[in-house]
């Protein structure tokens, strides 16, 4: 039996927090030349640009995506280009245009060229009426424009599968915590920024209060979840294909500070909540990922203690190398 041919992959929004790590995981899997990274911006010296093909492309420019797909015989798109919650609530028109309009372009091209698509959703699809431990199936009434665009994205994914047979899949990522790239303008950014400040100055002023609890996940788990779900046979993917709940860990800022303080002592966190507190309060504390576990065997590996140790070790090492 001959092995399946290596697919050609296009990643949009590839220079962001997730793209920085997903592109490198995909290049390891398929080979560097088979993974074309793209973004609306360029960052000099960025590993995604240095380590394989990179093209600038605005996802709102459907024709430029079409040219990339045709020129390179693309088979799969990992569509990461988006405007996140905090930036999105400052500019809701742009958020809607990029998150819904960009996805519409990608899905239409996927229909035309018979591509598979990964399109992330978010815990931001949930609203204040959702139980604290968010079920997979529950009314989705987000208060943020960003959350509304993610609900629309899930509906579009289901529609393109049911009506056009386009295999689109998504995950409702929790707040993602990583050290290789900065967080990209979301509400959960405090859980990344806190590590940088702890190491630099032993102090952090947090923009949400101490009791704020949200679903979070270490990036290694998120990348593994993405690859595992995309590798699952289509028969096992259920109606939740537009946005599977996946759980990593769930903690308050106080619990995070206590864990960081075990390594960085003294570490002082003060609180100055802003509008992002409202967005955080509208989201659940944790999510039920039974369906992801049943359909494609999802299980997180990183708990709070392990995540904190990984973040502090890697950021300290990176700082030492830079100095
Ligand atoms: P990010 O903000 O770090 O990266 C997004 C990238 O998209 C940026 O590099 C940006 O330059 C690019 N971009 C913006 N507008 C564009 C356009 N018009 N055309 C092309 N590129 C454009 O975001 P991320 O954290 O990497 O998130 C990727 C996806 O995952 C998004 O859909 C986001 O909603 C989702 N998500 C992320 C998190 C998280 O905690 N990081 C959680 C839930 C869901
Ligand atoms: N981490 C993201 C944000 O805060 C959730 O989608 O916007």
Image (cartoon, rainbow, N blue to C red):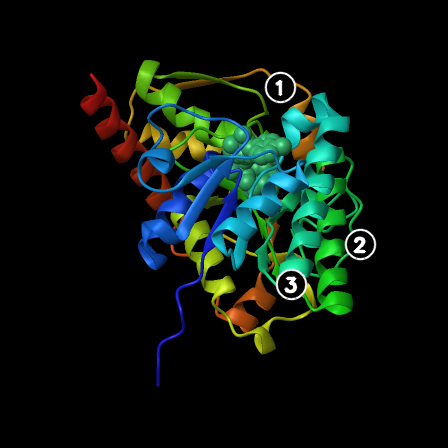
| Inter-mark Cα distance, 3 to 1 | 35 Å
Q: Nearer the viewer, residue 157 or 110?
A: 110
Q: Residue at x 76, y 34 (%)?
A: 145
Residue 257 spot, x, y in % from top left: 42, 29
**Where is mark 1, residue-wise?**
273
Q: Quadrant of ligand 1?
A: top right
Q: Is residue 321 above or below residue 133?
A: above
Q: Residue at x 49, y 38 (%)?
A: 38
**Where is mark 2, residue-wise?**
139
Task: State whether residue 64 appears in this view.
Answer: yes
Q: Earlier in the sequence, mark 3 or mark 2?
A: 2
Which mark is drawn over residue 153?
none
Label 3 Cα neighbours within 10 Å, binned few <14 / some 14-19 / many ≥20: many
Q: Nearer the viewer, residue 94 or 86?
A: 94
Q: In which quadrant of the rendered image does the C terminus lie?
A: top left
Residue 75 located left or right of residue 1: right
Q: Earlier in the sequence, mark 3 or mark 1?
A: 3
Label 1 Cα neighbours within 10 Å, binned few <14 / some 14-19 / many ≥20: some
Residue 295 spot, x, y in % from top left: 56, 72
Foreground mark, 3 or 1, reads 3
Foreground mark, 3 or 2, reads 3
Residue 7 spot, x, y in % from top left: 44, 62
Q: Residue at x 45, y 57 (%)?
A: 8
Question: How many marks can you see?
Answer: 3
Q: Residue at x 53, y 57 (%)?
A: 76
Label 2 Cα neighbours within 10 Å, binned few <14 / some 14-19 / many ≥20: few
Query: Do the CB atoms of the residues marked 3 and 2 lie less than 8 Å apart?
Result: no
Query: SS of the residue at dot 3?
Result: helix
Foreground mark, 1 or 2, reads 2
- Ligand 2: does it lie within 8 Å of the C-beta at label 2? no
Q: Earlier in the sequence, mark 1 or mark 2?
A: 2
**Where is mark 3, residue-wise?**
241
């Amino acid at each position: 039996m001959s092995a399946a041919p290596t697919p050609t992959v296009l990643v949009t929004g590839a220079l962001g927090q997730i793209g920085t790590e997903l592109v490198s995981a995909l290049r390891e899997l398929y080979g560097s030349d088979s993974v074309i990274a793209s973004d609306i911006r360029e960052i000099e010296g960025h590993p995604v640009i240095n380590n394989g093909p990179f093209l600038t492309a605005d996802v709102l420019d459907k024709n430029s995506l079409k040219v990339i797909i045709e020129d390179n015989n693309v088979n799969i798109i990992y569509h990461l280009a988006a405007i996140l919650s905090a930036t999105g609530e400052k500019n809701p028109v742009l958020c809607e245009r990029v998150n819904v309009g960009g996805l519409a372009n990608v899905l239409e091209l996927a229909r035309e060229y018979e591509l598979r698509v990964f399109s992330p959703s978010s815990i931001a699809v949930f609203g204040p009426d959702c139980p604290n431990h968010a079920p997979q199936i529950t009314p989705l009434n987000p208060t943020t424009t960003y959350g509304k665009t993610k609900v629309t994205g899930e509906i579009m994914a289901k529609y393109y599968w049911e009506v056009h047979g386009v295999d689109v899949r998504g995950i409702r990522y929790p707040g993602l915590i990583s050290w290789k790239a900065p967080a990209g303008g979301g509400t959960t950014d405090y859980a990344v920024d806190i590590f940088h400040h702890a190491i630099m100055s032993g102090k952090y002023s947090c923009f949400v209060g101490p009791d704020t609890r949200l679903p979070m996940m270490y990036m290694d788990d998120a990348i593994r979840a993405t690859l595992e779900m995309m590798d699952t046979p289509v028969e096992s993917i259920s109606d939740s294909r537009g946005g599977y709940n996946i759980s990593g860990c769930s903690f308050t800022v106080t619990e995070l500070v206590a864990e960081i303080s075990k390594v960085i002592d003294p570490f002082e966190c003060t609180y100055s909540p802003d509008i992002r507190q409202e967005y955080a309060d509208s989201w659940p504390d944790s999510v039920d990922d039974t369906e992801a576990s049943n359909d494609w065997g999802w299980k997180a590996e990183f708990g709070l203690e392990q995540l904190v140790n990984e973040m502090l070790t890697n950021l300290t090492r990176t700082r030492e190398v830079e100095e």
